[in-house]
Image (cartoon, grey):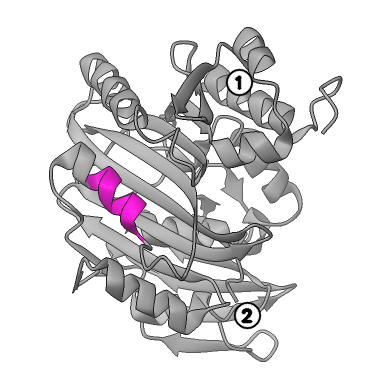
Amino acid sequence: MDLTPAAHDSRERNSHANGDVGDSGGGIVVMESREPVVSLSGARADLLAGLRGRRPVLVTGPGSKLTRPLHDLVQAAGGAWVVRQDGGAMSDGVTGLPVARPQDAVTGGGRAGRLEAASSDTSLLTTHGATDGLVQVLRLEIAVRSSLQSRGLGRTAARAVEHLTGREPAGWGTAEPALEQWDDEAIYLYAERRSPRPTYVVVAGRGVVGSLLIRRTGQGIEELSTLDIALGPAGADAVAEAERRARDFLDWLPAQPIVNHAMTSTFAGRADLLIAPASGATAAPLHLVIGAPTLREREVPLDEAVGRFGAERQARGRMVALRFPLAGNGAGSGWERAREIARWVGGTDEGSRPV
């Protein structure tokens, strides 16, 4: 994604509408805020839209919490979140690993440490190892093919939210808070004005937060919906309910001809869906779906997928998708299994079929 704030002079620092912004050199822009809740405000959205290839590092206080749209956009830009304690010590906001300087979170040993610690998708870390006072969150990541001529941008996200909550998203916006009433047509017109540049919008609803990224790929227009949906009090029963509801939702999704891929996972998070500095709880993967267009283009042998990975065929007419179950083996092994499947489908698994 081309997340590119306006050019700054080397090591420039200025007062920003939502905190200090400084260019630390080396292609890194540091944003600092002590707000209790740090969100994707209009000013931050403008900043992230003008990075010109530089990577953002968001520095907050130990009591700050991030909204999911801001967290995801910083990550998508190759950036990082750093927590600065009152005494000056700093740590990575996702992994909790110490860093000497903010830029170390995305360069050198700091970056290597982040990648090692993120071996089981630590982007979904939550506030506590225990689940007391937390809710079970279902995360959906859905990539579909679309067209600016279809005037249906955002409909997959809306259907997902409506299916799982009984109501469509309440609002959308280019920043937070997302105050525009949900309107597929308005999202289409906004994306059309921005084309061929990527379009990123916030999705909001009762117990729902997420984003919609609309971008051009080699195959046309892709919509990537990322949604966190609060289900109820966290715990073992809630995990089973999350798996059931994800499976129910995916019953109709995989065979749709426009679905490239989809991923579902679940984790214990805050009821307000904010992200606090990490302490070690990870998401558990539930399902990985590879849609018909990807299967066809990659010439994936369906029988081998069923035999090797236990994939389930999902068919509607002549359109066939594959759903790979990932739950039941722990978070770490589930994510490793997902990576193995992705390597195999992409033809990069050693000894795999040629593509």
Where residue 141 appears, as percent x and y from the top left, is 44, 43
105 shown above or below 23: above
Query: Of the residues shown, which amino acid type is indicated by label 2?
Result: Asp
Residue 175 appears in which quarter of the rendering? bottom left
The crowd level at tag 2 (other Cα within 10 Å; few <14, some 14-19, many 20+) is many
Q: Is residue 164 above or below residue 301?
A: below
Task: Identify the residue under disc 2.
Answer: 23
**In this rendering, position of residue 101 left or right of residue 225:** right
**Tag shown at residue 337:** 1
Q: Residue at x 41, y 33 (%)?
A: 264
Viewer-side residue, 62 vs 149? 149
Residue 187 placement, left or right of 346: left
Residue neighbourhood size for the residue with mark 1, other residues' Cα within 10 Å, grouped as few (<14), some (14–19), many (≥20): some
In the rendered view, does 93 fall on the left or right side of 296? left
Residue 155: within the magenta?
A: yes
Which residue appears at 47% of the width and 57% of the height?
223
- Rendering coords of residue 55 (x, y %): 63, 67
Residue 326 visible to the viewer: yes
What is the x, y in percent for residue 61?
Answer: 39, 60
Extent of the magenta region = 154-161
SS at mark 2 in the image? strand
